[in-house]
Amino acid sequence: MNILLNASRRSRWVLVIVVAVAGAALIWGRDLIGLADGQTSRKALTTASTDRSADTSGGSGGAAAEQSLDLSEKQTTALKVGPLGTHEFQIQKTAVGAVDFNENMLVQVFSQYPGKILKAFYNVGDDVKQGDILFTIDSPDLLQAESTLLASEGVLELQKKTLARATGLLKQGGMAQKDVDQATSDEQTAEGNFKAAQNAVRIFGKTDAEIEQILINRKVDSTLVVKSPITGRVVARNAAPGFLTQPGNAPAPFSVVDISTMWMIANVIETDAPAYKLGQEVQMTVPAYPDKVFTGHVTNLGSTIDPNSHRQLVRSVIDDPEHLLRSGMYASFVVRVGDPVTSLAVPADGVVREGDGTMTVWVTTDRRHFVKRTVTTGLRQDGWVQILDGLQAGETVVTEGAVYLSNKLLLGEAG
């Protein structure tokens, strides 16, 4: 009985162990199967992702290669299309500078003799004509010259009377011939001194009529008149009543400049310096008169390049018959430096600068399908852009509305 009981206990334990082992084996097998399934799933996902990436890259590569759009008939109304044409481009250089007086036509007006200024008649900005009186001075030198003139006239009159009396006495035998000859010599000397005195007064600017009045009235006038030597505009005045003036001592009482021409002074970049030559035609504009074009020519080229700015001075004489320009005005100018060239060209509205800096033009053959073309551009003038490479003569291009196509391509069909 005990033996049977012990056997029954051992069987139960064996059964428990077998069940436990079977359960563990079942759980372990299930984990192995799940792990294998997970690896298989991850592999499938990776493969699918790779396939999608390859499809995507392949699709974008094809789009980049073609870069085209198809528009509906309604959408094409936003564009203007035309054949690729040509345009004549001027070979020219541009620069900016400032307007200044033509110093070759600038005159500093001094008195020829020292004296005290009595009156000044014009102010800065006034226009004067040649011969207009700018100022007057009280001149001791003029006073001395007029006094000498009156004295020489008196001596001449005396010598004339002496010669006449000597000639009369000679005829009556009351005078020797040598005395008559001496009187004749004295009269000629007095006449020479008188003429010299007249010329001395005439140097001060006195006319023959004024000199005659001095002799008739026997009255001197020390007022020296200083006139404008040219027709122009007063640009500086340092004259005032009571001021003493000396010939050639700065500052000049008045400065007058002929404003029929002005200077345009510019500093051009060093790389453009070889293109400028003397005599080249210049077209200049100023902000004060944006619709007015002033013309002239290059008259002076700087002999050195500024070591700090690396620029060269270019000076031009600009015609200004209407006297519109003012010294100090900001100005820009264009100089034609070569013969014009005729080249393929597209209107400026037909060329688009992309985000990477490239220039593009849209080309079409049927006015519905448009292809973007990268081009190389050159000069820009009068609303035209020179095409150096990327297009062929005879192609049909978008002449207005190219930005619309580029934006539509960038945003996609939703744009």
Image: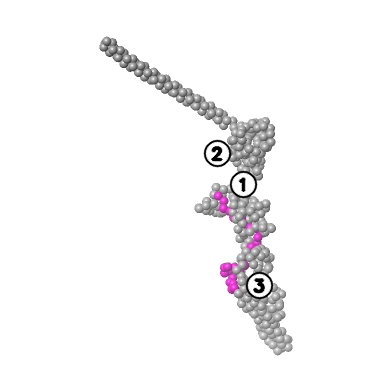
Residue in the image at 67% along x and 53% along y:
292
> Are the residues flagged by discs 2 and 1 in contact, CB closer than 8 Å?
no
- Residue 258 vs residue 159, the one in the foreground: 258
The answer to whether any part of residue 196 appears in the image is no
Quickly name the residue at label 2: 356
Query: Magenta residues, as a range?
Result: 243-269
Which of the two discs, 3 and 2, labels the residue nearer the N terminus?
3
Residue 259 on the magenta segment: yes
Residue in the image at 46% along x and 25% along y:
42
Quadrant the N terminus occupies: top left
Name the disc covering residue 241, or none: none
Name the disc covering residue 225, or none: 3
Residue 339 on the magenta segment: no
Q: Position of residue 375 (x, y in %)?
A: 59, 37
Instruction: Check disc 1: other Cα within 10 Å, few if <14, some if 14-19, many if 20+.
Output: some
Q: Amino acid at mark 1?
A: Gln
Q: Is residue 26 above or below residue 376?
A: above
Which of the two discs, 3 and 1, labels the residue nearer the N terminus?
1
Q: Amino acid at mark 3?
A: Val
Q: Quadrant of residue 225?
A: bottom right
Q: Amino acid at mark 2?
A: Asp
> Are the residues flagged by discs 3 and 2 in contact, CB closer than 8 Å?
no
Which secondary structure lies at badge 3? strand
> In this view, which residue lies farthest toward the left?
2
Q: Is residue 390 above or below residue 171?
A: above
Closer to the observer: label 3 or label 2? 2
Name the disc covering residue 92, or none: 1
